[in-house]
Amino acid sequence: MPRPTSPLPRPSAPGRGRLHVLIAGALLLALAPLHPASAADPEPNSAETSAPVAAGAERWSDTAHGFASLAGGTTGGAGGRVVTDPASLARYAGAEEPYVIQVAGSLTLDPFGTEITVASDKTVIGLGDSAELVHGGLHLAPGTHNVVIRNLTIRDTAVDGDWDCKATDHDGIQMDTVHHVWIDHNRFSRVCDGQLDIRKDSEYITVSYNRFEDNNKTFGIGWTSNVRTQITIDHNLFARTKQRNPSVDNAAYAHLFNNHLTAQNDPTDPVWTYGNWSRGRTKMVIENSYYDGVQHPFQADATAELVQRGSILRNTSGRHDTWGAAFDARAFYAYRLDPAAAVPALVNRFSGPQKKIGVPGDTGTPAVG
C-alpha cells in the first residue's frame, strides 16, 4: 500500500452513506447552550449534560468514515458470501475469499484465550445486540487489510488476581501492520491484556461507537518507532478503565472526537490512571469530548503534539497538556461534530451493540440470501 508523504486530498463532500450525514432530521429534542470547557472552566450545569436524544434516531451506516474511508475505503466482506455458522467462525474468518460472517448468540472460545485469525476482505458482525465472543478474541496478522468488525461483545479473558495482566496476553482484538480496518459498535469488557491493540504501523483505521468497560490496559496504539498510523476514534465510551484510553504512540495522525470518558477504576492503584496520551511523535487532535471524573484527562510527551478544543471537563485533575499545531482533520475527510454537552446521552444510547444492526434488511449488512 502506498505510504502518504503529504496530506491526502480533502474530499469535496462526504459520501451519501457516511455515518454523520445519514442521520435525518434533528437528533436532539432539546439542547441547552454549549459552553466548551477548559481545565480552568467551571463545571457545566445539569441542563448542559442531560440533553435527551430523539426517539427513532440511528447512528450507524454500512459505510466506513474517518481515516478508514480513505485510500480506497474499507468495505470488509461486501460482495462475498454471507454465512451464519458460529461453529465455523474460525474457518470462514481465516479463508482467502471475502465473507460476511454473521455471529448469533454467545460463542465461548476454547481453549481459554483463543484468538481467532481474521484474514483480509472480511466482515464479522453480530446479529442484534446479543452476539458475543467469550473467553477469547480476534487477531489480524501482518498484511491483513479491508476488515470490518462490528456489533459484537468480546468479554471475559481477564484472570482474577492478575489485574496487571502480567501472566496473560489475551487481547480482545489485536492487529499488527494492517491497513483499512473499521471497528464499530462493539463492547469490550474484562479483557486481559488489551481490549483493542492496534500495533506496528497499522494504517487507515477507524474506531467508532464502541464501549470499553471494566479494564486495566484498555486501548493501545503503536509499538513502533515509525510514524505512519492514521486513526479516527469517535463516539466511544470508556467506563471504569484505568489506562490507555487510548494511549497513542508514534501515530502520524490521531483524531479523537465526541468520546465520553468516565471515572477510572483501579482497586489496587488509584493513583496512576489516565485518559488520552499522545506519545512519541504522535500528532493528536481532540474535539468535543466529555471527561467526567478523569485523572490526567489528556497528556502529551514533549516530542508529541496535542490540540484540544471544545471538550467539557467535570471533576478532572492532573495533566491537561496541549502544545503544537498537530493537524487539520478536515484536510483529510469531512465530518460533523456533535456538541460536547450532548456526548454522554449520545454515546450511552448508541455505542456498543445495537438490536437493529446485523438483522436482515439493515443497512449495516446484506440480507441472508
Image (tube, rainbow, N blue to C red):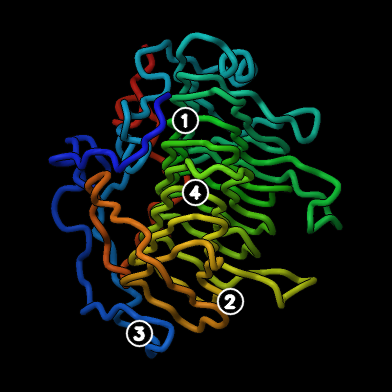
Please state which of the two labelled residues, at mark 1 or mark 4, is closer to the viewer. Answer: 4
Tell whether 283 sits left or right of 274: left
Between marks 3 and 2, how big is the CA–CA gap? Answer: 18 Å
Q: Give the SS element for disc 1.
A: strand
Choose top left, top right, bottom left or bottom right for residue 33.
Answer: bottom left
Please state which of the two labelled residues, at mark 4 or mark 2, is closer to the viewer. Answer: 4
Between marks 1 and 4, how big is the CA–CA gap? Answer: 14 Å
Choose top left, top right, bottom left or bottom right for residue 32.
Answer: bottom left
Between marks 3 and 4, how big is the CA–CA gap? Answer: 32 Å
> For mark 3, what is the residue?
44
Q: Which mark is residue 179?
A: 1
Residue 345 in sight: no
Please state which of the two labelled residues, at mark 3 or mark 4, is closer to the viewer. Answer: 4
Q: Give the SS element for disc 4.
A: strand
Between marks 3 and 1, how big is the CA–CA gap? Answer: 39 Å
* Residue type, label 1: His
> For mark 2, what is the residue?
295
> For mark 4, what is the residue?
251
Instruction: Name the residue: 33% across, 66% down.
Output: 288
Image marks 3 and 1: residues in contact by CB distance under 8 Å: no
Image marks 4 and 2: residues in contact by CB distance under 8 Å: no
* Residue type, label 3: Pro
Earlier along the polypeptide chain: callout 1 or callout 4?
1
Tell which of 356 and 185 is nearer to you: 185
Picture coordinates of residue 87, whole percent (x, y): 65, 18
